[in-house]
Amino acid sequence: MMILNHPTKIPNHTPFDFGEHRFYFGKEILELSDSSSLINDFEALLKKIREDGYLFIRGFHPRTDAEQAAQWTLQNIAQRGGLQPDTKVEDGIIGERNQTFSFFRQTEVAHAKPILDVVDSHRTMQFYEKFLGGPVITFDKRWLRCMAKGGHNHFHYDSVYVGRGTQNRYTMWSALTDIGLENGPLVLCLGSHQHDKLKSTYGATDMDRDLTDAVFSTNPREMVDKFGFTLGTAHFQPGDVIIFGLYMMHSSAPNRSNRYRISIDTRYQLASDEKDDRFFFREDGSWLGNFYNKDVSYKPMTELRHEWGLE
Ligand SMILES: O=C(O)CCC(=O)C(=O)O
Ligand SMILES: [Fe+2]
């Protein structure tokens, strides 16, 4: 039997510190709604993602698989001198250098069996086959992120980075470690998948084609006060996932703890749909990726937002 060990519901008025900004649960930030009970009802899942713009599925991956992927990643961090000496690897205690590790191009780490056993698992691929209605593929590039203290991301739509080809593509963000409110959880802007103005301006940019800044905002406060979004997050446990489309504004809060925050984000689409060629192996065994234009400058987001009337 599977053991479902859910964290307790986050009470109203619980503070959430996002950098220098504080938000309170129940008002400006809500706990994401867990769809794990719908896991075999694809009609319901499709309806839910159409309405909410995301699926939060606790225990999507077996917890032990996610923990093994974290352990593998931490061993690699240890080999690179990233952990605090004389601590257990599995505790993931950040060393003096406080180094954030992004294992993106290091396929010997990010494509090793313990990682692919999670994100390319039979269970995962079968889920997307049913969800999308046919054979599916995942990008060769996988974003394995290990945030040291202070490490985080900024608000963006994935369309701007990984939006070429089909628009029927999903990101899956998988928690590999225990990621509570202190550990830099992923944060969504609820309803941002239905913000037509944002989608048709910022969301329509391709950072490498248009040479535009890819980050929409570094300030969670303005996402709430200026754009009217309610934020959404949760206490994630190893194996919990969030699935969302190309137009869901998200970021992550800074890791405030002394423990590595490890997640991986991967992309899935129908095999028959047009790919985004930047993220698949070429003949030389590497992929192009983002930021492939050399000696260029990217148009600042402040200027773009001025032009769009989104200041
Ligand atoms: O994990 C993060 O901090 C960012 C993840 C992200 O941007 C994504 O999953 O698309
Ligand atoms: Fe993203």
Image (spheres, rainbow, N blue to C red):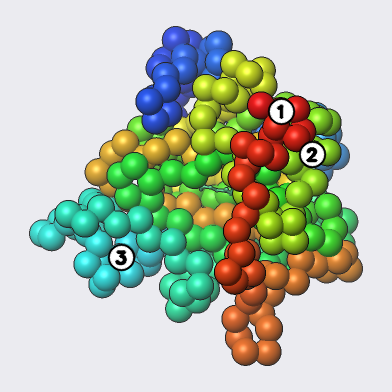
Image spot of residue 249 (x, y percent):
66, 37
Name the residue carrying label 1. 310
- Residue 91 seen from this side: no
The picture places residue 208, in percent across and down from the top left corner, at: 69, 61
Whether the residue under disc 3 has CB within 8 Å of ligand 1? no
Marks 3 and 2 sit apart, C-alpha to C-alpha, by: 39 Å
Q: Nearer the viewer, residue 1 or 112?
A: 112
In the displayed structure, does residue 92 sit left or right of residue 20? left
| Towards the viewer: 126 or 186 | 186
Amino acid bearing label 2? Thr
Reading the chain from its start, which is encountered first: label 2 or label 1? 2
Q: How far separated are the C-alphas under marks 3 and 1?
A: 41 Å
Is there CB contact under 8 Å for labels 3 and 1?
A: no
Q: Is residue 181 above or below residue 117?
A: above
Q: Which residue is mark 3?
A: 77
Please give the name of the residue rendered at 31% of the width and 36% of the height, measured from the top-left corner. Answer: 256
**In the rendered view, does 104 fall on the left or right side of 22?**
right
